[in-house]
Every structure is written in structure tokens, then in C-alpha cells.
Image (cartoon, helix red, strand yellow):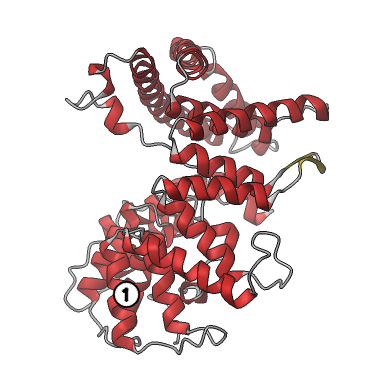
Amino acid sequence: MSRRCLSRYLRPAVSQSYLLPARGSLFHHGIHRLNTQSLASGSPSSVAYSSNSGDIVFHEYLQAEERIRTLKEENEKKRSEELYRAWQKSSQRAKNSKSTGVAVIKTIVKQANKSNDDNESKDIQWWEQRATALLQEAAETHEHPEALVRLANLSLDTISETTIIDTEVIRDEINRILGYYDKACRLGSKEGCFNHGNLVWTGFTSNQTPILVPNPKLALGSFQKAIDLGDTDSMYFLGVVLLSEEDDNNEVVQTVTRSERKKMGLEFIERAASLHHPGALYYLSIFYLNGNEELGIPPCNPQEFAKRLDAAVDAGDAEALFLRGHSFYCGDTPPYPVDYTRALQDFLTAAELGHADAAISAGAILHQPHPGVEQDQRRAFLLYQQAGELGSKEGWRNVVACYVNGEGVPQSHETAKYIAETMLKEEDE
């Protein structure tokens, strides 16, 4: 299957779209991030109406986190505006100076430091302290399962970025984190079981020193507990691990052959897919498209591939949406004909799910004339910006091009220069 670029504004679609995901790409850090929106929304089903004190404290923590998020968004917006104004003023004053770069940097740094001392930053600090206290109370005093998992997640993030060189201190912290996950698991949290298994599976290294040695056998037990609790992520994870294993001396399941392990892996993924796991559905669409010689599975026909891919799309998998959108755009993947309207729809939906390449692709369709699609360079610009905010350098590069050419936004070489210097500077060095 060939790959084509939508336009000069779209990075060519990567061939990995048709490859099975690597083990490390299944989950971001392999850690569940619990959804706080439903609990913080104050809906009738909210835990605020529960008589359980642990639920009440955890709900107060979620409200504090929501307040912190709002304050940070407001601060970030204000700071961005201040930095841009500072950059404009510094550039203007330093036009005839030999030390232009130094002047700009000094002013921007001064302005950035200034914002750290305002009342809003103090407000955030107060709420962060309150949130931490509430989370610790919910987890350690009331043994609230979700609080235990969240506290462990935050602690793991912190210890992963630590500059502490005392390995015993780090080892104690990792053991404490494992204890949180294990307790949550025993209290019926499938997230706790999965996260315990994931950490034990991958191990932990700090400053190139092994702190926790990987233990696949122990991890398998935690994954199985999560599966028993109906955790589809664990089914998918373990299935992919077994299906992709090439070592005959497998440490996880030594009692069966490699072929039998692969069959077990496929069964786990099929089970997750039957429970509408988006990643599992997408994985199977690619798996059956490629076939598997060792398991005697021939490549499926285009119609079966499309049926499986459509199921993954319906389940909300961003990669599946991106791939189907690409198929509709190129028309080289039967039974998907060239249909720019449907391609745009899939790209937009994937972009809403946080897929940066899809945002760029949608922008590219709107940027240039395409049959059946109304050209909208303003919306294209906003999609490029969205991709940039999702971490795509290509997205920022397109934003710069829009400002340079005055497409979708008023022409501004000054703004283009500012974005290039701030968002693309690392690439140029």
C-alpha cells in the first residue's frame, strides 16, 4: 500500500500505520490515568452523595485538582500574553543594538520570573498543598482504592524525575508505590492490579542503577487479577506480549510452547476486542490484514479488514480513525474509495481524541481546494495550532507558514518569527 502526502502542509503518512504496535507503545508509561471529570462534575451519581468518608475526601481532592487546572490555564494564558508583549517591546528597542539577542532574552526572563511572584501563583500553591493533603488522607487514612492508585501514580512520576542519588531512598519509595498499587488491587481496583503488574514487569532504574529488577512471573499474577476484574487493558497488554514473544525460553509461561503462547495471546486480544477495547480492535484489524504464518492465519481480504477497522473506529480508536481517514483520502485501500469529506470527518474525530497527525491532515484538506469540501484556511490554521499544542513540530511549522503567507490569519512576519524562535528553536540548533 502506497503512501502519499496530502499536500505540502501535511507530513507523509507513516508506514507504521499498517504495523502492529510495539510493546512499549501500548500505554503511556503503562499507567492508568483515572478520569476525574465525572466525579468532579457534581452530577447526581457523584461520590459527594456517598456516606463513605473516603469517597467524600477523595471527591474534595478531585474538586481541588479541578480548581488547580483552571488556575493554571488562566495563568498560562496570561503568561503567554506577557511574554509575547515583552518580546515585541524588546525587539523594537533592540533594533539598532548590537546585543539584540541578549536584550530580548533578559526582558523575557525578567517578565517570566515576575509572574512567579503574583497572587495567582500563591493561590495555586495553596490549592496544591490542599490537594496533596486530601489525597494522602483518602489513600492512607481511608484506604480509598482510586486515591491509592492516584497517589502511587503521582509518586512514581515524582521519583522518575528525581535527582536523588541515594539508591536506598529511591528503593524505599518504589516499594511504597508498589504497596499502594497492591493494596488498591486487593481492594478490587483493576487499575491498581494493572499498574502493579506493569511496574513489576518493566522494573525501575534510576541514574542507570537498577532499583527494581523486572519480574515477569510476579507481574503475570497481577495482570491475571486485573483480567479477573474485567480489565481489558490487561487482556490487551498481556495478549500482545505473548503474541509478539519470539523467545522459546519464555519467562512468563514456561509450561507451553511458543506457538501455544501465541494462541493464548491472540485469545486475550480477541477477548478484549469482544469487550470493545479500541486498541485491541485496531490491533486485530492489522493482525489479520498481515496474517500470521506461525499460527496458520492467512492475510484476510480487504472487506474483512475494512469491517474490523470500522469496528475499531466505532470504538473510538484514534489510530484507526487516522488510518481510515488516510484510506479515504488516497483511495488505494479497497473497499475505501476516494472520499475527501469522509476523510476529513475521520481526521477531525481523531484530532479531537488528541491525534496530532490527524489534526495536520484535517488542516491540509481544508487548506487547499478538495472536491466536496469547502475550503476554510482559518479552520486549517486552528487545526495546525492544535497539532502544535499536542506536541507536533510539523504543526508549529505549518502555523508559521500560515502567518508568513497570510493564510487563515492576517499576515505577520513578526508573529511567524516569534513562533519559530520559541517553538522550533531546538530543531534549528
Residue nearest the observer in this picture, 288 or 387: 288
Point out the residue furthest to the front here: 255
Q: Of the residues shown, which amino acid type is indicated by label 1? A: Arg
The answer to whether 356 is drawn above or below residue 333 in the figure is above
Q: Residue 55 in the image: x percent, y percent?
A: 35, 19
Residue 372's quadrant in the figure? Answer: bottom left
Residue nearest the observer in this picture, 133 or 76: 133
The answer to whether 206 is drawn above or below residue 151 in the figure is below
Residue 347's quadrant in the figure? Answer: bottom left
Quarter placement of the N terminus = bottom left
Would residue 356 be found to the left or right of residue 170 on screen?
A: left
Within 10 Å of disc 1 (Cα), the crowding (few <14, some 14-19, many 20+) is: many
- Which residue is tagged 1? 308
Residue nearest the observer in this picture, 329 or 176: 176
Residue nearest the observer in this picture, 232 or 397: 232
Label 1 element class: helix
Would residue 176 be found to the left or right of residue 402 on screen?
A: right
The answer to whether 188 is drawn above or below residue 123 in the figure is below
Residue 81's quadrant in the figure? Answer: top left
Is residue 160 in view? yes
Number of numbered markers: 1
Q: Residue 225 in the image: x percent, y percent?
A: 50, 45
Q: Which residue is drawn at 29% across and 56% down?
A: 408
Q: Residue 138 in the image: x percent, y percent?
A: 45, 17
Q: Residue 426 in the image: x percent, y percent?
A: 64, 50
Would residue 94 be found to the left or right of residue 118 on screen?
A: right
Q: Residue at x 36, y 53 (%)?
A: 411
